[in-house]
Amino acid sequence: MSHFNCELHEGLEAELKKVKDDATRTFLRKYYRVEQAEPPLTHLKLPPTFGSQILANAGADLTPKVTRPSARFCASAHAAFEAYVKEQKEKARKKNEEADKKKAEEAAKKAPATTKAFSIW
């Protein structure tokens, strides 16, 4: 399950927590949920695998087995995603620095040689 699935799960849970009545919240949680199939499926395999089950009863448990993300899993997914973003930003910064340096070197090569003019008067 990805960082983005955790974001969606946490967002849904935050909204469900706003529902004051426990019975209503429990009922809604059956229909508004984020789950992952085991083994994970690609997006295009979801409809043939789960489509008929969801159309028959959107609140029923799905087969093959699915799991909901745990808080612990989401914390590690968020940390991994943040580390990835930081790494990508650092790579982009280094690439930009190298490109700027190369441009400066090329500009220096193309610039006419300057001489200092002086006067004896």
Image (cartoon, rainbow, N blue to C red):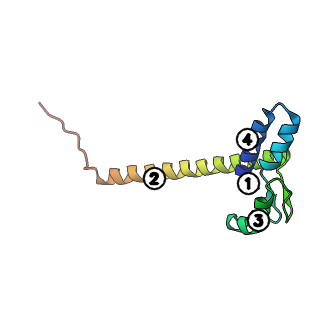
Q: Residues within 10 Å of mark 4 (few under 14, many from 20)?
A: few
Label 3 sits on residue: 52
Could you tell me how far apart the alpha carbons at marks 4 and 2 are, in whole angstroms?
Answer: 40 Å
Looking at the picture, how far across and down is residue 103, in whole percent?
39, 52
Residue 68 is left or right of residue 91, and the answer is: right
* Amino acid at pointer 4: Gly
Is there CB contact under 8 Å for labels 3 and 4?
no
Which is more toward the observer, 70 or 106?
Answer: 70
Could you tell me how far apart the alpha carbons at marks 2 and 3 are, in whole angstroms?
Answer: 53 Å
Q: Earlier in the sequence, mark 4 or mark 2?
A: 4
Q: Earlier in the sequence, mark 3 or mark 1?
A: 1
Could you tell me how far apart the alpha carbons at marks 3 and 4 are, in whole angstroms?
Answer: 26 Å
Looking at the picture, how far across and down is residue 67, in whole percent?
85, 56
x 86%, y 57%: residue = 61
Viewer-side label of 1, 2: 1
Q: Earlier in the sequence, mark 4 or mark 1?
A: 1
* Amino acid at pointer 2: Ala
Viewer-side label of 2, 3: 3
Label 2 sits on residue: 99
Looking at the picture, how far across and down is residue 16, in whole percent?
78, 38
